[in-house]
Image (cartoon, helix red, strand yellow):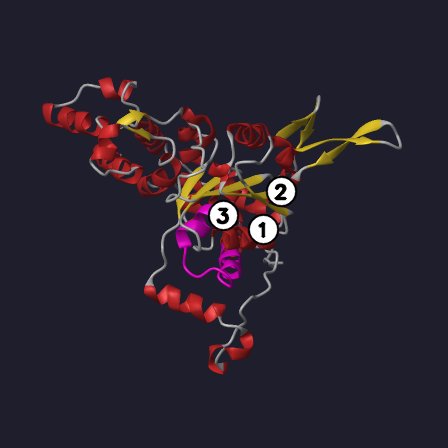
């Protein structure tokens, strides 16, 4: 594990832990800094993540690597249309010898859950996972069982396949702290990926390294608690907090922000934006943005939150919580484009 000097404060310890995490993850994951930062951010905040990207972009590998550096128990669940809630949570099994039912716990009783292609599961399975995500418990028969702590769900979905899929309802999407979009690597990063994929026996000697490197646990329970303590110590000014709430409130066309007095030009700009928003984000988004803004400041090595931290965290926090109108789809706008336009309209303190 990481050794610290007795004189190191919590911020220095947190910086050392984060650097060790990035170093370990870089052994297997090339690039994808936004995804890796989002994974660590959600782990510190105690939230769940929705990963969206086409196959082959290392989503599963990243989740497995995160579990490896934390030393937490890990289970991968492949969601399919014929999956049953009992396949996820577990079921009661009749024991002939004793004449009683015993509980056979499902894979959801792990600390890190990879819900692969979650949108392929029917509504009953999604509702079972919803209880686990929100309440950190599952009900089998008439008994409720607590899930391990920490409990971390990372769900993936493929944005280009719609046959045999079930759209996640807004109530379930709102339970995810972040939605991360996994993008294609750059040319230089893809060349490095090719080098990592070459078997060790055929790789040039000057390249060094191995195809699959063993990751060391650097984010155990005490280290995670250090990061959370450091994040809680990050200062947020009241003006920044008001700006944060204004950003979330501005996503609601029917909210009080839409009725605020504005000049003719500003009113026209807001009306043009609200053409593209059917429903805005809930107060749960404000809580998520508050947590993630402080953690983002921690990642930057600062002890205070700036407006740029709020802006940077707004995209992954809000993109799955805003429901766009048909006009947005007709004009080719995605949630990120709408949120970026919203951020330009909300005054920065």
Foreground: disc 3 or disc 1: 1
* Quadrant of the drawing holding the C terminus: top left
* Quadrant of the drawing holding the N terminus: bottom right
Highlighted range, magenta: 18-40
Foreground: disc 2 or disc 3: 2
Side of 142 where 257 appears, left or right: left
Side of 278 where 172 appears, left or right: right
Q: Residues within 10 Å of mark 2 (few under 14, many from 20)?
A: some
Give the numbered dot on residue 203.
none
| Residue at (45, 71) in percent of width and height | 195
Q: CA distance from mark 3 to mark 1?
A: 11 Å
Q: Is residue 276 visible?
A: no
Q: Which residue is mark 3?
A: 40
| Residue at (41, 55) in percent of width and height | 32
Side of 263 where 211 appears, left or right: right
Q: Position of residue 154 (x, y in %)?
A: 51, 42
In this rendering, is residue 177 above or below 260? below
Looking at marks 3 and 1 on the same chain, the residue that comes earlier in the sequence is marked by 3
| Residue at (16, 29) in percent of width and height | 269
Foreground residue among 28 and 259: 28
Asked if labels 2 and 1 touch by Cβ distance under 8 angstroms, the answer is yes
Q: Position of residue 139 (x, y in %)?
A: 66, 26
In this rendering, is residue 276 above or below 260? below
Q: Is residue 256 visible?
A: yes
Q: CA distance from mark 2 to mark 3?
A: 15 Å
Give the numbered dot on residue 111.
2
Q: Secondary structure at mark 1?
A: helix
Q: Residues within 10 Å of mark 3 (few under 14, many from 20)?
A: some
Query: Which residue is the extreme one toward the bottom?
Result: 205
Q: Which residue is mark 1?
A: 67
């Amino acid at each position: 594990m990481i050794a610290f000097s007795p004189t190191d404060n919590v911020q220095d310890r947190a910086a050392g832990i984060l650097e060790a995490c990035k170093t370990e993850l870089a052994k297997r994951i090339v690039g994808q800094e936004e995804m890796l930062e989002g994974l660590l951010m959600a782990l510190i905040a105690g939230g769940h993540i929705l990963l969206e990207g086409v196959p082959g972009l290392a989503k599963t590998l990243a989740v497995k690597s995160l579990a490896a550096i934390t030393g937490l128990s890990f289970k991968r669940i492949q969601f399919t249309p014929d999956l049953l809630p009992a396949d996820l949570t577990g079921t009661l099994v009749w024991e002939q010898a004793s004449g009683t039912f015993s509980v056979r716990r499902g894979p959801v009783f792990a600390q890190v859950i990879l819900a692969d292609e979650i949108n392929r599961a029917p509504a009953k399975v999604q509702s079972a996972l919803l209880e686990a995500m929100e309440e950190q418990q599952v009900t089998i028969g008439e008994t409720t069982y607590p899930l391990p702590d920490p409990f971390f769900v990372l769900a993936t979905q493929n944005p280009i396949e719609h046959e045999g899929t079930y759209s996640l309802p807004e109530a379930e999407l709102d339970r995810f702290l972040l939605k991360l979009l996994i993008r294609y690597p750059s040319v230089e990063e893809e060349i490095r990926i090719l080098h990592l994929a070459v078997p060790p026996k055929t790789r040039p000697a000057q390249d060094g390294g191995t195809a699959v490197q063993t990751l060391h646990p650097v984010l155990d329970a005490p280290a995670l608690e250090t990061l959370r303590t450091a994040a809680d110590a990050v200062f947020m000014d009241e003006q920044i907090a008001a700006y944060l709430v204004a950003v979330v409130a501005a996503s609601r066309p029917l909210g009080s922000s839409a009725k605020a007095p504005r000049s003719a030009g500003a009113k026209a700009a807001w009306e043009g934006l609200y053409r593209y928003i059917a429903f805005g984000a809930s107060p749960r988004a404000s809580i998520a943005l508050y947590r993630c803004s402080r953690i983002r400041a921690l990642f930057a090595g600062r002890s205070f939150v700036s407006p740029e931290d709020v802006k940077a965290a707004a995209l992954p926090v809000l993109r799955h919580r805003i429901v766009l109108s048909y006009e947005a789809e007709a004009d080719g706008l995605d949630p990120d484009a709408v949120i970026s336009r919203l951020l330009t309209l909300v005054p920065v303190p």
